[in-house]
Image (cartoon, coloured by chain):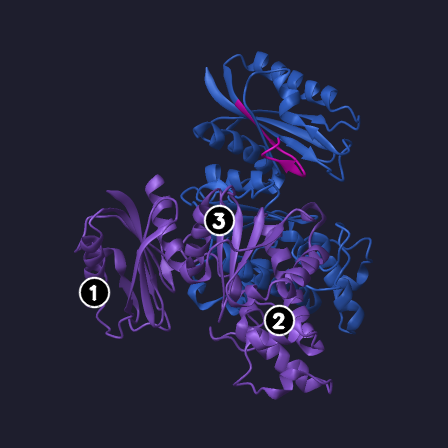
Chain colours: A purple, B blue
């Protein structure tokens, strides 16, 4: 029998379930539609049935524990709390639901924290004890690792770097406030920046062929590769804001490295090089040229289940 | 024999040595002039002689360990590194020097981290595992406690909240950069603010009787108590900047409470009330009305040695 941890990634549309060994190999993988039914019990039962089917089919796997990454996942409570894009309103308790079905230990955290655990156990942070993972997707998530463990804070919700305010009365944010980092630094954020630069300038740009609705960060990336000035300016503006926030964050937490993960991070040198430059420009002397800005070592498609499984493996070691 | 930890506070002018029991009682206290001699060995020997004299005189104390709080003190290395106001240039190793004189364990950290340990063991954070201490003196120091231990980060220098940049190209800072939080939020910071408000206004104020050289934060505090509008505006401006930075810091570390300590914190409601108000204004919903802003529970004059001794007691528990 091979020991595995189950890594579950609950997304807005799909929920993916991976059987991951201690080396970070995904031995089996399944997915179910994320329930739109407000009753969490039936959904957890569906996930558990899927796990059992896989166990039977494999016939050589032994489950050690279950890790779950979910939006607004709370490690301390084992809950999802007020997740805007999921069917369950208020607070639902995942560990309680699983405990009705299995005695195996269940651990819950949010997506960005799971990504950080994945990076530590299976990615590019293997020898590190103090680092940060920034996920650049539709929003900006962050997972902070301190002394080899996730920084959860008092209530389990630490690591909301995306909701630090970089511009008082700045861009409207989904959180209801204005000027949050993620309104500037994220896939939609760089699109808002490009649109705004286009509006203020008369410079030629391939980006003028797109509207607010059709523009996306990949188009800006491709334009930057073709040396489109507006696209390059959009990356520079984004990197300037990110670099300053990372410099301030470094002054607080002093990580060994910062990993960029997700959509915008795949823009490679167009985001990494100017961000590193601005970090060094804004940073306090004692941290200068010390903190590495690195790409994630996790495969994009499996990062979420690897991270969730890593959470379980890390907890089981304790 | 009563067990004590030695708490040593190395300041710019004086070095204070306290014999502190596990209840936080200072059983003996001495001080020596901080050496202006670049040779650290002779200074450590002087401190150690002072400890031995006290031990002889008391005749009933047993030393368990030694904690040292010093500017730019590095916990990992046991060193003071590049402290601008001390005679020892570069890096001096305190634990090495003490180990020539005594086999007792020696722990080093900076002043703000020592204050945080003091707060946890002997002050107002006794039941807390995640909190922050902000020291508001000639600068702004900060000590972050995460899971009951100081957040040191990768290199030992985490917790430099005073050197996050709140205003790009803002006020010149002693660190060589511009716009650092401590140039606005500190005893000299509020004086710079008051001077700047006075320059822009024609409003009457008792603060007009002072110059840049003679104004201090206590004068502004006393003026605020007498309802001087300029003084009240200076506190409001300071609290606005501090409140925003604390809201951003809370989003990263999610502490249970924030303690204000030192000079400016003794302005009581004039700093606490507007700062709490601005925190709630700027903060992300999930943290709203959750994080307490509290005064330190340590006596001002002995906080530094209590903190240094608390560091030793906390390490000895491990």
Question: Marks 3 and 1, how far apart in space?
Answer: 32 Å
The kind of secondary structure element at disc 1 is helix
Residue A201 is marked as: none
Name the residue beneath numbered marker 3.
A145
Asked whether, in this view, residue A47 is left or right of residue A223, the answer is left
Q: Chain of mark 3?
A: A
Q: Are marks 2 and 3 on the same chain?
A: yes
C-alpha gap between disc 2 and disc 1: 44 Å
**Residue A273, quarter of picture:** bottom right
Judge left or right: residue B291 versus residue A311: right
- Of the pair B201 and A218, the residue shown nearer to us: A218
B257 to the left or right of A16: right
Q: How many residues crowd around disc 3 within 10 Å: few (fewer than 14), some, or many (20 or more)? A: many
Q: Please provide percent x and percent y for residue A229.
A: 71, 77
For residue A316: magenta?
A: no
Tell me which label, 2 or 3, sits earlier in the chain.
3
Residue A155 in sight here = no
Which residue bears the numbered disc 2? A167
Which is more N-terminal, label 1 or label 2?
Answer: 1
Which one is in front, A245 or A236?
Answer: A236
Task: Read off the residue under disc 1.
Answer: A46
């Amino acid at each position: 029998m091979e020991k595995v941890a189950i890594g579950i990634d609950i997304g807005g549309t799909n929920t993916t379930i991976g059987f991951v060994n201690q080396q970070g190999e995904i031995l089996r993988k399944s997915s179910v539609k994320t329930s739109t039914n407000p009753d969490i019990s039936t959904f957890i039962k569906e996930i558990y049935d899927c796990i059992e089917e896989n166990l039977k089919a494999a016939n050589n796997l032994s489950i050690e524990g279950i890790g779950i990454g979910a939006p607004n996942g709370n490690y301390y409570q084992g809950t999802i709390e007020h997740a805007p894009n999921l069917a369950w309103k208020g607070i639902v308790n995942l560990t309680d639901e699983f405990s009705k079905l299995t005695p195996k230990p269940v651990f819950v955290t949010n997506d960005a924290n799971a990504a950080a655990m994945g990076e530590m156990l299976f990615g590019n942070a293997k020898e590190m004890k103090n680092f940060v993972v920034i996920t650049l997707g539709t929003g900006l998530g962050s997972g902070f690792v301190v002394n080899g463990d996730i920084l959860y804070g008092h209530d389990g919700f630490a690591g909301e770097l995306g909701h630090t305010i970089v511009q008082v009365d700045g861009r409207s944010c989904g959180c209801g406030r204005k000027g949050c980092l993620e309104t500037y630094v994220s896939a939609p954020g760089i699109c808002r920046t490009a649109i705004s630069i286009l509006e203020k300038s008369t410079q030629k740009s391939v980006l003028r062929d797109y509207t607010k609705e059709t523009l996306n960060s990949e188009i800006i990336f491709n334009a930057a590769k073709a040396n489109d000035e507006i696209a390059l300016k959009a990356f520079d503006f984004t990197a300037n804001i990110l670099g300053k926030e990372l410099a301030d964050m470094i002054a607080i937490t002093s990580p060994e490295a910062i990993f960029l993960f997700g959509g915008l991070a795949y823009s490679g040198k167009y985001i990494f090089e100017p961000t590193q430059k601005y970090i060094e420009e804004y940073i306090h002397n004692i941290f200068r040229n010390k903190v590495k800005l690195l790409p994630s070592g996790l495969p994009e498609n499996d990062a979420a289940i690897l991270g969730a499984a890593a959470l379980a493996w890390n907890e089981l070691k304790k």
